[in-house]
Amino acid sequence: MPDPHMNLFYSYNHDNELIENNLTRAFLVTLKHLSPPLRTRLIRRILRVSTSDRGCGNPAESLDFGAAEFALQGHVDRAAVAGARCKCLLSISSAPVFETSSIPQEAYPSIPDGWIVAPHGEYCILIESKVGTNPLDAVQIAAHAREWLRVDDPGEITRVVSWEQISAALADECEDPRATSDSAHERAMLRELLDFLQFYGYRPFRGLKVDGQLDAPGWQLTRRPAVRKDLQPVSLLKSPPAFTIGVH
């Protein structure tokens, strides 16, 4: 196995919270350094596979992410993101399961993990990510929607995607025939991010590979086994003795 520390994004620190922040950072840094066509293509792939329990609109087809800007945590203009015409709260986790925190909603410290925003307020995507078995927190999502996007009902804008689905989108992009028009540096960035996700077990399932397996043996019976002629038919066998136990 290659040394993971040679990966562009891999960290020596294995603290859970830092890994969570590192995954989001690696994702956004990669998007930032892609060309406008490839960036738009990849973000649309990810948004297409995202889901919504409430059936909220999917901005995948209508938005151009070529001029998108990226930020981490609270490093955005609050007024700009709250006034965006198209708002989306993208929740990323290992499994799309929401749990309700015991923290009161009005007291929840709302610090989003990342942002994808348009420079002129056309759209805003707030990103909340979880790693490992950490579940998405419904109270935290509601706090993000209310405090940053000025949306009272988070179900109207929340979409959910898994890190495995993002890994699959990266793999599909690497295999896309249109990739010939992308630069070598862009392809390397995508591969580094894909490898980084796979170091933590986030890899797409591509089915079972059978290449290189030995062929099944072609055994055949060349002749029927001989039938023993000294065996009597069951009908000619004597009945078993009827034992009785007497009481003395």
Image (cartoon, rainbow, N blue to C red):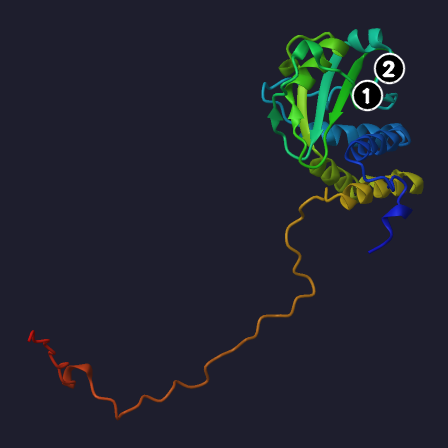
Quarter of the picture holding the N terminus: bottom right
Q: Position of residue 219 (x, y in %)?
A: 52, 78
On the picture, is 93 further left or further right than 65? left
Q: Secondary structure at mark 1?
A: strand
Quarter of the picture holding the C terminus: bottom left
Give the residue at x 16% y 85%.
237
Q: Position of residue 52 (x, y in %)?
A: 62, 23
Three-letter residue code for mark 1: Trp
**What is the quadrant of residue 103 in the picture?**
top right
**What is the quadrant of residue 158 in the picture?**
top right
Depth check: 114 or 123 in front?
A: 114
Mark pair 1, 2: CA separation: 8 Å
**What is the quadrant of residue 160 in the picture?**
top right
Identify the residue position indicated by label 1 in the image.
115
Identify the residue position indicated by label 2 in the image.
76
46 to 56, vertically: above or below: below
On the picture, is 49 further left or further right than 12? left
Q: Give neighbour class at mark 1: few <14, some 14-19, many 20+ (Cα, 10 Å).
A: many
Q: Are marks 1 and 2 in contact (CB under 8 Å)?
A: yes
Q: Position of residue 26 (x, y in %)?
A: 85, 34
On the picture, is 157 further left or further right than 173? left
Query: Does label 1 or label 2 sit earlier along the sequence?
Result: 2
205 to 79, vertically: above or below: below
Q: Position of residue 100 (x, y in %)?
A: 61, 21
